[in-house]
Amino acid sequence: MTVSVAEVMPRPVGRMQRVDGRAEVGLVRGSGRTRLAHLHQAGSAKAMLPRCHGTSPEVVLLNTAGGVTGGDRLRYAIDVGPGAIATATTQTAERAYGTKNGVAKVNIDLMVGKGGHLDWLPQETILFDTANLYRRTRIDLSTDATLLYSEALILGRAAMGEAVRSLSLIDRRDITRNGKPLLIDPVRLDGAMISAPGQCALLSGCRALATVVLIAPDAEDAVGQIRALPGIDGVTIGSSAWEGKCVIRLMAVDAWPMRRALVRLLTQLRGGPLPRVWQI
């Protein structure tokens, strides 16, 4: 029997399809309202502006791929013009899935013009076992611009019985004013940090952590408001303020108490409800 070379040689494995998306939104102030001036979308990165009853729009970013894994690339950019006021969030929690090779990269660039304000309130990022994510968030505020910022990380889905034993996360957050650093807040997690039980300097068994930042002339006054809020079981909150900045850190045993604490905290700082996608 004659056997051809093609029958004995292994077939080449095709290159896996990877996400490559970009979404850009530009907002300007005019006629007493903030309105859309620029919108660009490519790949799986999308931006929506649902109808709102107020004078400031909500920008909802989403990744139609449903999550990121090794080799994926996502870029988001929002430019809030001078005097403009806006809220930006995500349609749902972003998911960083496990991968055997490659790094998922997400770059977020936010700019707020003179006298403008942005509430940057993305929903949680869920990190699955063996996830490998590099994310960089750069926020540049112009003169007199103000900011409310939130970022939450969840280690796996407790309801599904998932345990995260190994991952690589580099989450760099840079906030500047006119190019000069205001707050540089890098977060790095790896398998050793999340698998050491009872280590208070690390996560001490918690599956959820979050950072909230308020940058405004009266930011120091927010500390008293935060400490007066009723506590939530399973959530530890610490806050400090200086030079027009208030930074709040949260750790929780699981995602649900963390979300409850974040909703209560952000509602207090905003002076009103969160975007509607948070309520779905």
Image: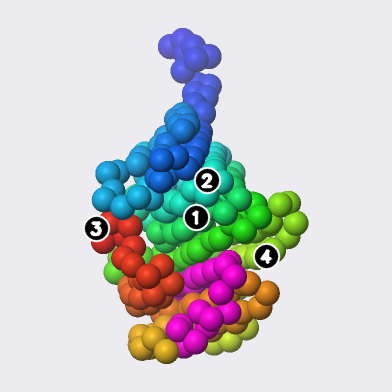
Say whether disc 2 or disc 1 marks the residue closer to the N-terminus. Answer: 2
Q: Secondary structure at mark 4?
A: strand
Q: Mark 2 — residue?
A: 80
Closer-to-camera residue (269/54): 54
Front label number (4 vs 2): 2
In the rendered image, which residue does mark 3 sit on?
280
Q: Which mark is residue 118?
A: 1
Q: CA distance from mark 3 to mark 2?
A: 26 Å
User: Do the numbered discs 1 and 3 sit on residues whose CB atoms are within 8 Å?
Assistant: no
* Location of residue 266 in the rendering, given as x and y in whole percent from the top left corner: 41, 70
Circle 2 crowding by C-alpha within 10 Å: few under 14, some 14–19, many from 20: many
Q: Is label 1 or label 3 in front?
A: 1
Number of marks in the rendered image: 4
Query: Residue furthest toward the right?
Result: 180
Say how the picture is coloured: rainbow
Q: Is residue 10 above or below residue 78?
A: above
